[in-house]
Image (spheres, rainbow, N blue to C red):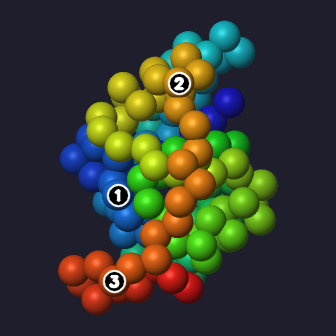
Amino acid sequence: MKIAVPTRNGMVDNHFGHCDYYTIVTLSDNRAVLSTTHFTAPKGCGCKSNVATELKEMGVSVLLAGNMGQGAVNKVTAAGIEVVRGCSGDVLQLINSYASGLVADSGETCDHTHDDGHVCSH
């Protein structure tokens, strides 16, 4: 299983579409970490880029994210990737918690204006 986490400075980036990079973690069948790599995030809004397709082509099946607008959620799930929102903190600790079954989707989408003027409600 491959998991992607929007990342900034080793922490879950709270804004999916504007992260520095995605941490891609491969888990074994018994959910042990086999490998960790990074994928540089494309510039621009996550729902308007082809990042979902690129992650799927890399074999990603789960995205552990902080906040995402509904447009981004729709695009990622349409690519066949499960979205788990409401994640935060250190990426490797999050992966370990997810592997242990301790992480669930918050069901919440981002729908407000950020400091940079970007609105997530699209």
Residue 117 locus on image (x, y percent): 28, 89
Spatial CA distance of label 2 from label 1 is 19 Å
Can residue 118 be seen here? The reply is yes
Spatial CA distance of label 1 from label 3 is 13 Å
Q: Amino acid at mark 3?
A: Thr
Farthest residue, direction bottom: 117
Indicate left or right for 38 with 78 as reference: left
Q: Residues within 10 Å of mark 3 (few under 14, many from 20)?
A: few
Q: Residues within 10 Å of mark 2 (few under 14, many from 20)?
A: few
87 or 9, nearer to the observer: 87
Question: Which residue in the structure is indicated by mark 1?
Answer: 14
Question: Which residue in the structure is indicated by mark 3?
Answer: 113
Indicate left or right for 75 with 110 as reference: right
Query: Going 43% across and 44% down the picture, which residue do you hit?
Result: 87
Q: Amino acid at mark 1?
A: Asn
Secondary structure under tag 3 reads loop
